[in-house]
Structures are given as structure tokens and as C-alpha cells.
């Protein structure tokens, strides 16, 4: 088990974009740019909708990775581990993330959309520039 340092957690709290990697049914990686959050226990998380590929991949295979890079490209954190899906706090989280990245509430909701939080339990952390 790995943990993010306090400095790495603070880095993830900045409005830097992340690339989330999940595993497709055929075993190939699926990369997506996401907004990133930090849970109270220091674990990274991101938000998606249940009908999207990321959520379906994690349901089938809970292996995931997240890489966050600052705008200068000279500082980054990569986290690999087991992912879990939860609807707990997912609606509030997407609004917090929209505020963090866009300065507004989330505008992409549809009536049938189920938001889900994807929390990664870090098993391996790699960082540069810290």
C-alpha cells in the first residue's frame, strides 16, 4: 500500500488536469482527461457518469491509474491502484470539481444521469519535482 505525501495531496488540490486510465474488456488501456479531487483520507478520486466507459471498465476490472501534471510539465504525480465506484457524494463532488476547474456549478447533468465517484486506493505512487 502506498500513500500520497501532504505535498502531493496539496498538488492534487490544484486545478491541474489529470489523465485517468482504466482497463477495457480486451485488456487494453483506456485514457481519459478528468478533473481530480482528493478524499479526506488523501486518496485521489474523479467523477464520471455510470453510462460512461470509465465506470463500466472499473465495474469489470477495478485497476486504475491517474496522472496529474502541472502546467509547466516539470512536476507530476502518478497513482496506480484499486478503484471503487460510489454514488455517495458524487453529485456534490461534480459541483465542487466544476467550481475548482470552471468557477461554476456543473452544467452537464441530464435527468437520467447517475453520477459516480471513482476513488483510487493507491498501491503505487510515482512523482517528479517534489
Image: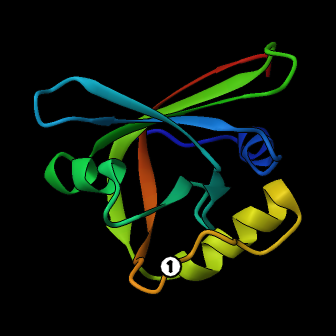
- In the displayed structure image, the side of residue 4 where residue 97 appears, left or right: right
Q: Determine whether 111 is above or below 13 in the image.
A: below
Front position in the image: 95 or 80: 95
Specify the quadrant of the image occupied by residue 59: bottom left
Residue 34 placement (x, y as % from top left): 58, 45
Horizontal side of 100 relative to 49 (left or right) equals: right
Q: Position of residue 107 (x, y in %)?
A: 69, 72
Residue 37, relative to residue 26: is it above or below?
Answer: below
User: Quick check: 121 left or right of 19?
Assistant: left
Q: What residue appears at the point 56 percent right and 76 percent down from the top-left corner? A: 109
- Residue positioned 77% across, 39% down in the render: 16
Colour mapping:
rainbow
Q: Nearer the viewer, residue 67 or 34?
A: 34
Q: Position of residue 130 (x, y in %)?
A: 79, 22
Q: How many marks?
A: 1
Q: Position of residue 53 (x, y in %)?
A: 31, 48
Looking at the image, the residue that sits furthest to the left is 26
Callout 1: SS: loop
Per the image, the residue denoted by label 1 is 110
Q: Residues within 10 Å of mark 1 (few under 14, many from 20)?
A: few
Depth order, front residue of 45/52: 52
Q: Is residue 76 above or below residue 123?
A: above
Q: Residue at x 83, y 58 (%)?
A: 102
Residue at the (12%, 37%) spot, across then down? 25
Q: Quadrant of the N terminus?
A: top left
Q: Nearer the viewer, residue 42 or 108?
A: 108
Amino acid at each position: 500500500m502506498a500513500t500520497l505525501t501532504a505535498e502531493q495531496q496539496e498538488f492534487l488540490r490544484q486545478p491541474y488536469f489529470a489523465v485517468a486510465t482504466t482497463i477495457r474488456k480486451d485488456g487494453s488501456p483506456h485514457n481519459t482527461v478528468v478533473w481530480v479531487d482528493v478524499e479526506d483520507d488523501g486518496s485521489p478520486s474523479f467523477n464520471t457518469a455510470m453510462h460512461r466507459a470509465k465506470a463500466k471498465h472499473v465495474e469489470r476490472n477495478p485497476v486504475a491509474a491517474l496522472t496529474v501534471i502541472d502546467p509547466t510539465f516539470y512536476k507530476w504525480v502518478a497513482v496506480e491502484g484499486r478503484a471503487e465506484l460510489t454514488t455517495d457524494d458524487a453529485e456534490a463532488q461534480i459541483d465542487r470539481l466544476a467550481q475548482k476547474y470552471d468557477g461554476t456549478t456543473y452544467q452537464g447533468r441530464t435527468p437520467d444521469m447517475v453520477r459516480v465517484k471513482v476513488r483510487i486506493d493507491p498501491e503505487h505512487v510515482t512523482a517528479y519535482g517534489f
